[in-house]
């Protein structure tokens, strides 16, 4: 019996130790969400959706309209769309940060999330991941490294293929 409880305790401790990875993502139309779910499963990680306080409508996402919400946000580097709920990043050592590529880089809501969680993100391992129509992740990686140069960014993952 004692052995059984000991084994149970070890298993619980192991799970707690492994659960130090977080997959935080923003997804406007579900593609990045699916990629985030795959990553979380693969790494036995917690999953966290970065949700905008005001959800994006189809009209907001119309990149052909230079007056749409997404176009206006992406034109202004200082834009920081509000986020619905705060994330507690303190328990995690490694954090995957996911997003759809918008105009070659990350949507401004990712800046909002990073800004909200500085300086708790200092010293943690951050791995960007993205989905896109066709663009690579290199420009988004370079942008994040430049904008948040004190953070420990690792090589990013483009997750367009299942
Ligand atoms: C406003 C906007 C801008 C986009 N810009 C790009 C882009 O520059 N390059 C690209 O390959 N795809 C671009 N896309 C396509 C998305 O990156 C792609 O559809 C992504 O997988 C959507 O992810 P989601 O379903 O998680 O929102 C853009 C989409 C939107 C809505």
Image (spheres, helix red, strand yellow):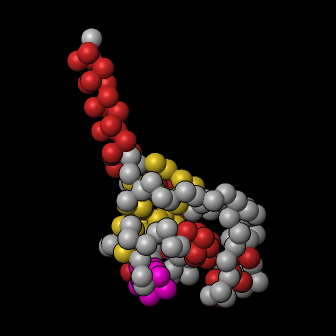
Image quadrant in which the C terminus is located: bottom left
Relative placement, left or right, of 66 versus 116 is right
Q: Position of residue 44 (x, y in %)?
A: 37, 45
Q: Is residue 33 above or below residue 142?
A: above
Q: Quadrant location of ligand 1? A: bottom right
Q: Is residue 50 magenta?
A: no
Residue 151 place in picture, x, y as percent: 41, 77
* Main SS of residues in magenta: helix
Q: Residue at x 70, y 59 (%)?
A: 84
Q: Residue at x 53, y 73 (%)?
A: 118
Q: Residue at x 62, y 87 (%)?
A: 77
Residue 118 visible, this orientation:
yes
**Relative to the observer, which residue lies in front, 151 or 138?**
151
Q: Residue furthest top?
A: 1
Using residue 123 as the reference point, say whether residue 74 is left or right of it.
Answer: right
Q: Nearer the viewer, residue 44 or 162?
A: 44
Visible in this render: residue 133? Answer: no
Stretch in magenta: 139-148
In the figure, residue 146 lies in which quadrant? bottom left
- The image position of residue 149, as x and y in percent, is 42, 84
Left or right: 6 in relation to 161: left
Within the magenta stretch, is there residue 146?
yes
Quadrant, the N terminus:
top left
Return the residue nearer the eye: 159 or 78. Answer: 78
In the displayed structure, would residue 142 be above or below residue 90?
Answer: below
Q: Is residue 139 above or below residue 22?
A: below
How many marks overall?
0
Q: Position of residue 126 (x, y in %)?
A: 39, 68
Instruction: From the viewer's perspective, tell me whether residue 150 is left or right of residue 88.
Output: left
């Amino acid at each position: 019996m004692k052995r059984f409880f000991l084994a149970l305790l070890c298993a619980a401790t192991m799970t707690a130790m492994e659960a130090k990875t977080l997959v935080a993502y923003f997804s406007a139309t579900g593609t990045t969400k699916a990629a985030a779910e795959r990553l979380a499963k693969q790494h036995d990680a917690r999953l966290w959706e970065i949700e905008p306080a005001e959800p994006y409508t189809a009209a907001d996402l119309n990149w052909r309209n230079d007056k749409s919400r997404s176009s206006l946000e992406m034109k202004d580097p200082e834009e920081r769309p509000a986020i619905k709920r705060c994330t507690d990043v303190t328990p995690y050592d490694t954090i995957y940060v996911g997003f759809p590529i918008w105009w070659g880089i990350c949507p401004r809501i990712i800046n909002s999330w990073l800004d909200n969680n500085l300086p708790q993100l200092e010293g943690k391992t951050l791995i960007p991941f993205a989905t896109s129509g066709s663009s690579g992740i290199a420009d988004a990686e370079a942008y994040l490294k430049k904008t948040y140069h004190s953070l420990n960014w690792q090589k990013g993952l483009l997750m367009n293929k299942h």
